Amino acid sequence: MASDLFSIGLSGLRASRAALDLTAQNISNAGTEGYIRRSLRVSEVGSAGTWLAPSDLTLSGVRIDGVTRNADLFRQAEVRRTGSDSARAAEELSGYENIEAALDQSGLFPAMTAFEAALQRLESNPVDPALRAGALEDARTVARSFNLASGSLDTLGEGLRFAATAGTQDVNTYAAELARVNLQLTRASAGSSDQTMLLDRRDALLQQIATQVGISTSYGPDQSVTVRIGGSTGPVLVTAGTTQSFAMTTAADGTISFTLAGSAVALSSGKLAGQAQGLIGVRDRKTELDSIADNLVTAANTAQANGVALDGSAGQPLFSGSGAGGITLALASGAGLATAPAGAGAGSRDPANLAALRNALGSAQVTDRIDGLMFGSASAAAARRTTADALDSIAGAARIALAEQAGVSLDDEAANLVRFQQAFQASGRVIQVASDLFDTLLAIR
């Protein structure tokens, strides 16, 4: 009996000590991102009775079966899915907010309205040098505002492409590391501390990949993971110890697309999908901006050609270049503004052609189109802000649910410290009782 008590007590000491170590590890990693709480998996040690009493069960202590991660694969998948959607919405919102800021900070709309106001003032006295100079400077400001807006959109596009390039590289880096973790998992013992550490690393890499691109996962018996981009039927990014190359291509219009192993792949979530949508927004706004600038050049220069300058010479183009990035002021002085109709003499006060210029700008709807462009950009950003806030709330709820299930509760761990410490002391007491019994038996004469 003493020998049995020794074995039972010793097994209890080992189990209690291992449980205390795990509890201490949980407490020390309570604030570690991605850490999953561990618990000790134990089972009762029992054996069948002797041939004299075959139905009896001999209990012989406790056996450590391994370490369990309190992870919920469904909740983890939900965190990745909702987080990927939220990341896409946040990146898309950032892109559209920057578009709105680029157009607003260029001062294009105020510059255009100031130019039209200057032309209206000039109509009251077409030969006034100050009014002519003021109108010409306002025209120069309009051209520069177009240049500034176009340049800001180009800079924004470059930033988005740079971020997407870095994100693409990150996907390949994380995928390669995940493939190595898969190989290590095939060699790790089930329930061992090494396996639990590898599983934490595996899940962290999956979360990092999901932040960049939407993924789906499936797991093998050895806990290795197969990763597909998109849904469960999407192309394979990682399987076992191998990966496929993920790449980004840039089109002539500045937009981006992605390939996996050389084949086109469509992204619906993740930062890269949001950056791609942001670049589409930049392209569309820049196309509209170029069209407005070209309409302004055509309307102003056509009106100029139909009139005469202050010295009676034929009107010359007011603007040169094309597109918002290329438009520049062509006239050297305010005297070149063709305010008088064709055939009028030098110093004519007839503002007929100036009125025609104003009407041409009105017919081209330059100011209205600029206003519509600004309003459309603001509306697009506002709509995406609502979507981003909603998706962020959903992702936050998923993270909270996972943390409640798999995270570390310091209150629970503190209670476990006391419980396992008492179990350790009780097991020690069992060994002490066995020792006392053995000494008593030896003392019998």
Image: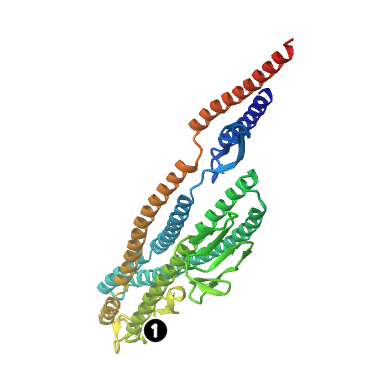
152 on left or right of 117: right
Q: Position of residue 23 (x, y in %)?
A: 57, 34
> Between 360 and 445, which is closer to the camera in this rendering?
445
Render colour scheme:
rainbow
Can the viewer see residue 139? yes
Q: For the residue carrying disc 1, how many other residues have a C-alpha within 10 Å: few (<14), some (14-19), or many (20+)? A: many
Left or right: 304 in relation to 47 = left
Residue 144 visible: no
**Along the horizontal axis of the image, is 393 left or right of 124?**
right
Quadrant in which the N terminus appears:
top right
Corner quadrant of residue 319? bottom left
Along the line of sight, the residue nearer the viewer: 224 or 394? 224
Quarter location, residue 179: bottom right
Q: Quadrant of the C terminus?
A: top right
- Label 1 SS: loop
Q: Which residue is situated farthest in the bottom direction here?
A: 343
x and y, in percent, of residue 228 in the image: 52, 64
Q: Residue at left 43%, top 70%?
A: 280
> Taking 46 as reference, is 349 above or below it?
below
**Which percent across, then down, holds residue 262?**
57, 74
Residue 301: x and y in percent read 36, 82
Q: Which residue is mark 1?
A: 316
In the picture, residue 346 is in which quadrant? bottom left
Q: Nearer the viewer, residue 239 or 384?
A: 239
Q: Residue at x 43, y 77 (%)?
A: 323
Please, what is the three-letter code of the amino acid marked with disc 1? Gln
Observer-nearest residue: 367 or 173? 173
